[in-house]
């Protein structure tokens, strides 16, 4: 498994695919749809490489159901906590939601459930700002609208 593959140069990607073909092992490339760095992209070479990748999946914004399932896996408890993580996940990303819940679990040492006060405290500590709590309690449309 290779993460952040979008940052590889075409030469590195080509060599990685050659290695995979020669050795016959499974290759999973994960990353964003664009480079994180502001460098120019050799689109022709990247298109050739991408055409050789067997399957491509794009994971969109998490749904409310996705967030609830992830919350259940992390032992979230309480309707208010589930509402908050669903709102947070839909306002951010799966990565951000999992990071938040992993930090909550670490703070509880894996014993007991994760309730809303723990989620709020952990998010405050992770973000060092009160604005982050808005992501727990405001709908995405409320964040966009100046009304």
Image: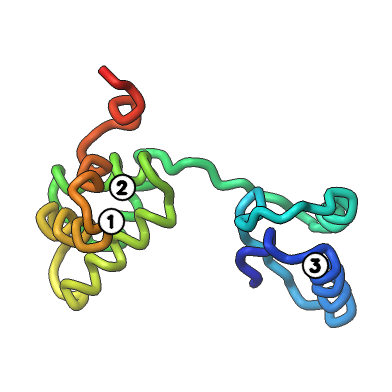
Q: Is mark 3 on a helix, strand or loop?
A: helix
Q: Can residue 6 be spotted in the picture?
A: yes
- x and y, in percent, of residue 41 in the image: 78, 52
- Residue at the spot x=13%, y=49% of the render? 78
Are circles 1 and 2 on residues that touch, CB within 8 Å?
yes
- Which of the labelled discs sits on residue 61, or is there none? none
Q: How crowded is mark 3: few (under 14 residues within 10 Å), some or many (20 or more)?
A: some
Q: What separation in Å lies between label 2 and label 3 (alpha carbons)?
A: 36 Å
Label 2 element class: helix
The residue indicated by pointer 3 is 13
Instruction: Reply above or below: 25 against 144.
Output: below
Which residue lies most toward the bottom here? 23
For residue 35, what is the image quadrant?
bottom right
**Quarter of the figure that contains the C terminus:** top left
Q: Is residue 83 visible?
A: no
Q: Is mark 1 on a helix, strand or loop?
A: helix
Q: Which residue lies furthest to the left in this view?
A: 117
Distance in Å between CA atoms under marks 3 and 1: 37 Å
In the image, is residue 103 above or below residue 81? below
Q: Which residue in the protein does label 1 denote?
A: 72
Up-down relation of residue 39 to residue 17 (above or below): above
């Amino acid at each position: 498994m290779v993460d952040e593959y979008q940052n590889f140069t075409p030469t590195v990607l080509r060599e990685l695919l050659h290695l995979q073909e020669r050795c016959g092992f499974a290759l999973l490339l994960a990353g964003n749809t664009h480079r994180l760095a502001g460098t120019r992209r050799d689109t022709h070479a990247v298109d050739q490489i991408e055409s050789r990748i067997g399957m491509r999946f794009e994971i969109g914004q998490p749904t409310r159901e996705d967030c609830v399932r992830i919350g259940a896996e992390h032992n979230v408890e309480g309707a208010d906590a589930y509402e908050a993580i669903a709102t947070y996940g839909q306002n951010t990303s799966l990565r951000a939601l999992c990071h938040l819940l992993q930090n909550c679990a670490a703070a509880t040492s894996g014993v007991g459930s994760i309730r809303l006060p723990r989620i709020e405290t952990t998010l405050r500590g992770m973000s060092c700002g009160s604005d982050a709590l808005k992501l727990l309690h405001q709908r995405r449309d409320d964040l966009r609208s100046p009304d």
